[in-house]
Amino acid sequence: MFRQNDNHLQQELHNSYTTLDPRIQKKLKNSWAPLFYEHVFCKIDEKPFAILYSRDRGRFNYPVNILLSLEFIKHIFDYTDEVLLDQYYFNYQVMYALGERNLGERYLGPRTFYEFRSRVYRYTIENPEQEDLIFGQFEKLTDHFIKVTGINTKEQRVDSTQIMPNIKLAGRLSLAYDILVQALRSCPEDILTENLKEVLKPDFKKELLYKCRSSQIPGRLVQIINLISELLKLVKTRSELTALAEIALLERFLKEQADLDEEQNCWLPKENKDISATSIQSAYDPDATFRNKGGKHSKGYVVNIVETCAEENPVQLITDYTVKPNSESDARMLEERLPEIKEKTELIDMYADGGYYSEGVETQSHELKVNMHYTDMTGKKPEPEKIPLSDFQIDEHFNILSCPENYPPLKSNFKQKTGIVNAHFNLEQCEQCPQKERCPVKFQKQNAILRVNYKSILAAKARERTFQEPLRREATSKRAAVEGTNSALKRSQGADKLEVRTYPKVRVVIGLKMTGRNIRQIFRYFQGKIRKKAEKLYRAPSIGVVCTS
């Protein structure tokens, strides 16, 4: 049964803290522990986690705010589970941060801790459309952090980074073998042929993978793929087997990696270039995908991070994050999250690299009144001999007010249904115009007409903003530091290669690390370790702990 933990609000008159030497008390007060207690532990909303527990039977749950706080501390300091539990048992700072004032007053068994984590994972897997419990806490805590620090959220920057789950970097042959073995072990032995039983013997793997020359790989891949086909034929009539996840994965692998040669009546591997980036990368993580970014190959997931970047901010905070299979494009992730970011913050200017440019992002940002600043742009470059559309005077409703020579159109309209902008100009004026040969208008019998898609206008305006040198320098300067945030998450918080695999678990762990990153920034703020550029505007507040539930 679920019960909220508010016992920490009423402390005993005499406890371990009151027996400390006053000098040690002062040192503890100036540490991270009181900050965590006031700004994290007391602000955790336990109610959404009630869904993980029975409503009317069983023992009361171990306090959720303690368990969740321990998860945050694990990812703040990059502890292992074993070290984390020792810290809880014996480190008075950790106990103080979790609202406990007597050393050793509450026991936490490892199984209780793991069971809570397992419940969160299961809920995430079974309820993909429901609110992510960890993301919900991230939002609530970040909103509190923004309020207490006075962070300006009008300017933000975005960047993505590749994350590898707990999978091995396997080649196609090793991957095929792993998927086949996993499926064979899920099937009754009595239905397997002798060829398939041979695969499960230890010597088979040794001969297949470890005693294989590079020239032999194509032939052995054909062998494994056809063994996969053989197993799928055997289980085809067994509904209880075809429903297994291991068999479904086997079938998916065959479709993604091979083609049936009807003349030879066998399956042949596809060429590498014909295999989709969304194809299976691991027998144990079907959600992981492949990506080649900047010449670097990676398997797993991509994390998109949005953080504040106003110069006057004492520290910068992550305001939003997205976790996707790494085949997802940067632009698509930003387009999906931009309305949510705009709704929960005061976003006006967003700084991004060229990979985030797309017609969808430009359209979305225009509708939300968000100014996109790119360091570069992808896509086809305009013809240099033609006048760019940005030279026309166009209002926010895509009405063309005048041409580059300041001639107003006879009429102008924008059809939202088709997205087409039409502007009719005086034919005589256009015929005499010195820029006639460079102008994008089309000459007709009665007038000259400019007909373009509104997305082309947005692209032209974005290109003009991007390649004006002062604006480009500013965008580059504003955006650059977000790469340092990604680096810090990987170096000091273990986000480079995770200890978990599959999308739901990766999403949960990344959420804990993102929250941990913001908590570290809050520590810096209250301890006076603020950005040098903000030192003249801010003074670190004194550390005083007054908890309000």
Image (cartoon, rainbow, N blue to C red):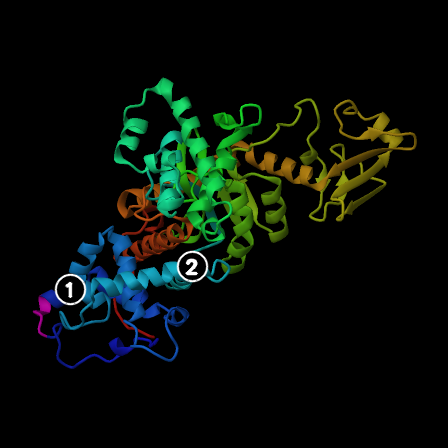
Residue 20 belongs to the span the image colors magenta = yes
Q: What amino acid is found at the position of numbered circle 1 in the picture?
A: Tyr
Label placed on residue 357: none
Residue 539 belongs to the span the image colors magenta = no
- Give the quarter of the image for residue 420: top right
| Residues rendered magenta in the picture | 19-23
Judge whether 309 appears above or below 49 on screen: above
Judge whether 491 appears above or below 317 on screen: above
> How busy is the neighbourhood of tag 2: few (under 14 within 10 Å), some, or many (20 plus)?
many
Q: Are marks 1 and 2 in contact (CB under 8 Å)?
A: no
Q: Quadrant of the C terminus?
A: bottom left
Q: Quadrant of the N terminus?
A: bottom left
Seen from the viewer's position, the closer of residues 345 and 497 is 497
Q: Residue at x 49, y 62 (%)?
A: 130
Residue 262: percent from left, percent from top: 57, 27
Residue 248: percent from left, percent from top: 47, 46
In the drawing, does residue 368 fall left or right of residue 59? right
Q: Residue at x 55, y 35 (%)?
A: 466
- Give the quarter of the image for residue 443: top right
Is residue 340 shown to the viewer in this render?
Answer: yes
In the drawing, does residue 256 fall left or right of residue 48? right
How far apart, in angstroms, are the residues tagged by discs 1 and 2? 29 Å
Judge whether 204 appears above or below 310 on screen: above
Per the image, label 1 sits on a secondary structure element best described as helix
Which residue is identified by label 1?
89
Judge whether 313 appears above or below 408 on screen: below
Residue 224: percent from left, percent from top: 41, 31
Which residue is identified by label 2?
124
- Give the quarter of the image for residue 358: top right
In the drawing, does residue 453 fall left or right of residue 117? right
Task: Please report whichever mark, 1 or 2, sits nearer to the chain's N-terminal start.
Answer: 1
